[in-house]
Amino acid sequence: MSPSTQQPFQAEVRQLLDIVIHSLYTDREIFIRELVSNASDAMEKLRHTQLAGGTIHDPDLPLEISITTDETAKILTIADHGTGLTREELARNLGTIAHSGTKAFLQSLKESGGSTPGTLIGKFGVGFYSVFMAAKQVRVYTRSAQPDGEPLVWSSDGTSGFTIEDAPGQSRGARLVIELKDDAHEFAQAATVKRILEKYSNFVPFPILLNGERVNTVEALWLKPKNEITDEQYTAFYKFAGKAWDEPRFRLHFAADAPLQINALLFIPTDNPEKFGFGQTEPGVALYCRRVLIDAQPPEFLPEWMRFVRGVVDSEDLPLNISRETMQDSALVRKLGDVIAGRVLKLLEQQSAEEPDKYSAFYKDFARFLKEGVANDFRHRDTLAKLLRFESSLQDAGHLTGLADYVTRMKDGQEAIYYQIAPNRAAIEAGPYLEAFKARSLEVLFAYEPLDDYVFSSLREFDGKPLVAVTREDVKLDDSPVDSAEAPLPEDEVAALCSWLKESLGESVTEVAGSSRLVDAPVLALTPEHAPTAQMRAMMRAMQQEIEPVRVKLEINPRHPMVKNLAAARTRQPDLATLAARQLLDNALLAAGLLEDPRDMVKRLNDLLGRALSR
Ligand code: ADP
């Protein structure tokens, strides 16, 4: 049977091909890397099936990639003896997009209004389809390694669809015959292809032959002694193993014999792979046993938050025939993962101690991952806490400090570690909370992300000291007298004003009290002990959960002229005083990030302005 009718590409593939073919594209040579990497993956898969005792067709074919260039016919051919594809796999794998990264890429492109992605295609790799940057026609001759595989040929010009026909005589694996576009003839020149292979594919773990000559070195770099490896080799390996375009930021190369035999070569990238907002990156540490790939992305091997780490872990203790499914349950794999996770954490701790500036730079790009770890990875929480960094009231803007350093600066008798979460430093410095801590020379850590609220509440304490938000009602500060020329309102008047305020403000306040902590601000809103914080409320709103109306404890500053005037107005101009009281509460809520609906406030402000101007 040889049905040569054309089958359509899935709509997303068409969209992708359209971008690939029509974008002005600078790095189009990467298509060779993508195809070589597919060939290598197919042979890794085959080798694994073989080791696990599966039967494969034509078991004696060599596992190598042979590439030939035909300058006269303008044809490039890339052939492997990997798993090959069945008829159904051809239609599915080369006719649809299953790859979640590519889907996300398309989605974000749609959202950006379809503007030209430029080098982004290169950065994210669109796999097989990238061939159409250079090809006017591609034929994939293949025979699946499965015993019932058929010799077939898939062909397409990359526009609307593809055909699948019989191809008698094709041996196991895949052979891509690429007819080059008129402006892509360079890819039929041996010298060009050689340069590209040396650039991207040197570490492919199978021999690559270009017109019969070996071009790559096939080296398991992780098994070599450190002093025999140059920085350039490390970097080239990182780019290959991590499918990366940036430079490695930190590297960890070690061997261990007990409790497990391990050779590991790991890297932390320069760029945060999630910074473009294309969703979660896939874990990037591959598991090998004596140079044989067991799994390029072993599930649940390292804690999820470590998904930015790239590299290779090789252990002779792993059984070769372990399957992905049993791997997850394997105590050995878990133990191996623990050792590696511990070493990565130790590397970060070391870096933070030895090269604090370099570590801070890492932290600025990767804090998200560490914070996610604090929230989800209970086992490593304490170590992760030491790796967190924040700005602080005692440090210049831009300078980061850790919790351990904070503790060394704590004052005698200071029991808690204080922090405030707000959108930025300016908001904290202009707000009413910091002044009480400043007046008492207490350091406050500044955090700027809603997620930080979750981080602090997951940690609860550090080094035995509770972590306390400065906006909390239960913050206990000593009553050190405030330096002020202004005489305070007498105590009985403060008490009377407070109970009047409580009555006027009703359910919005749990309590109103005179404050000893305020210096320059007239009022302050504090979050009651078990009430949700501003950040939690924002999160609950985003998740469309029911939230109770805001209730705060209001503290008033008895030395503030406005508070004194309010005390006087309360009896003389009760209407105006009530409006002013509500406005003061809203001002305090605004500073606390708790003013959720400003409509009433705007109306009231207009009313107050009207009165002020008509006087
Ligand atoms: P990715 O490699 O990222 O999954 P590709 O678009 O490059 O995406 O390839 C799609 C799929 O086609 C692969 O996952 C694989 O199953 C199959 N494939 C591609 N090239 C080969 C090959 N040389 N041998 C066998 N299967 C292949």
Image (cartoon, rainbow, N blue to C red):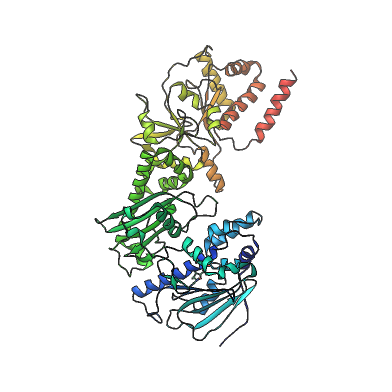
Q: Position of residue 341 (x, y in %)?
A: 35, 52
In the rendered image, which quarter is residue 386 located in?
top left
In the image, what residue occupies the spot 29% across and 58% down?
Answer: 262
Residue furthest right in the image: 614
* Residue 364: % across, % down: 48, 42
Q: x, y (%) of residue 319?
A: 30, 67
Q: In the figure, is residue 580 to the left or right of 450?
A: right
Q: Residue at x 36, y 75 (%)?
A: 50
Residue 3: x, y in percent? 59, 84
86 w.r.t. 550: above or below: below
In the displayed image of the protein, which residue is found farthest to the bottom?
1
Quarter holding the N terminus is bottom right
Which residue occupies the foreground of this view, 85 or 421? 85
Quadrant location, the C terminus: top right
Asked if residue 140 lies left or right of residue 203, the reply is: right
Please name the residue shown 65% across and 15% down the image: 572
